[in-house]
Image: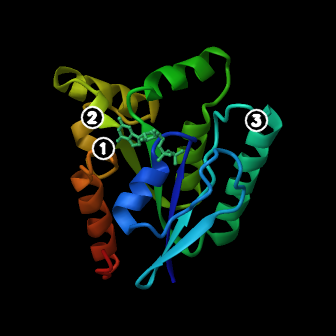
């Protein structure tokens, strides 16, 4: 089978994105950090997996965040053979600052850690740069360059259009992501989406 895994911090808009992409068949539990198990949706022959949101969770102790991270890593390791594609959802507008805040504390930001980890285990990973509707048109390219830099991808970001998909789940503007997903599926001789 063919699995696509969606990961991201809480509140980046992962649920909104999944709802837009696959309809109402996604996670219902809304409170961040409540669900520790991955949620699965079948879309024709595809297995879509929504991992619990990691990182910031209001009112949840640090320990719980580590548990979410460990469980996610464990799930990915266990199922790496089957997981053909990863989608890391980020909140574009706050991503550079969040990464820099962790860096200044000599910690590896969880998003970066996940991106590197997914790629290390051989999972092709797309960045869904969400909430682009919050970004002024004049800042659009420079923000995406900043995001690329944090991910270790040499700017200009346009060179990474096969990895970075600027989207707005709220506005339903998912063109960039949909075309990357279709492209990847097509490469694997599938046309589920
Ligand atoms: P999740 O915790 O990652 O599943 O995030 P949700 O889908 O619950 O969204 C968190 C918040 O971000 C909600 O208030 C959404 O309305 C908002 N949101 C989601 N996508 C977008 C987007 O593309 N643009 C903006 N401005 N807000 C968004």
Image position of 165 (left or right of 53): left
Residue at numbered disc 3: 60
* 191 shown above or below 61: below
CA–CA distance between discs 2 and 1?
A: 6 Å
Q: Secondary structure at mark 3?
A: loop
CA–CA distance between discs 3 and 1?
A: 28 Å
Q: In this rendered view, identify the residue nearer to me: 111 or 61.
A: 61
Question: Closer to the N terminus: mark 2 or mark 1?
Answer: 2
Measuring 53% from the left and 25% from the top, which residue is drawn there?
Answer: 99
Badge 2 residue CB within 8 Å of ligand 1: yes
Q: Position of residue 35 (x, y in %)?
A: 70, 55
Badge 1 residue CB within 8 Å of ligand 1: yes
Q: Position of residue 162 (x, y in %)?
A: 29, 52
Residue at numbered disc 1: 168
Badge 3, how many Cα within 10 Å: few under 14, some, many 20+?
A: few
Quadrant occupied by the C terminus: bottom left
Image mark for residue 133: 2
Q: Secondary structure at mark 2?
A: helix
* 139 shown above or below 82: above
CA–CA distance between discs 2 and 3?
A: 29 Å
Disc 2 to disc 1: CB gap under 8 Å: yes
Question: Closer to the N terminus: mark 2 or mark 3?
Answer: 3
């Amino acid at each position: 089978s063919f699995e696509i895994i969606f990961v991201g911090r809480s509140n980046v808009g992962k649920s909104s994105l999944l709802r837009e992409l696959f309809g109402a068949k996604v996670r219902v539990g809304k409170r961040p950090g409540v669900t520790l198990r991955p949620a699965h949706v079948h879309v024709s022959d595809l297995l879509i997996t929504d991992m619990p949101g990691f990182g910031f969770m209001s009112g949840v102790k640090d320990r719980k965040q580590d548990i979410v991270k460990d469980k996610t890593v464990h799930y990915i390791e266990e199922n790496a053979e089957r997981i053909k594609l990863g989608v890391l959802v980020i909140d574009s507008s706050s991503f550079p600052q969040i990464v820099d805040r962790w860096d200044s504390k000599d910690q590896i930001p969880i998003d970066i850690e996940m991106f590197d980890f997914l790629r290390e285990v051989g999972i092709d990973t797309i960045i869904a740069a969400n909430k682009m509707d919050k970004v002024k048109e004049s800042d659009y390219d420079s923000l995406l360059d900043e995001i690329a830099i944090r991910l270790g991808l040499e700017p200009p970001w346009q060179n990474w259009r096969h990895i970075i998909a600027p989207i707005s789940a709220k506005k339903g503007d998912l063109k960039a992501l949909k075309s990357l997903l279709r492209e990847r599926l097509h490469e694997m001789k599938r046309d589920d989406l």
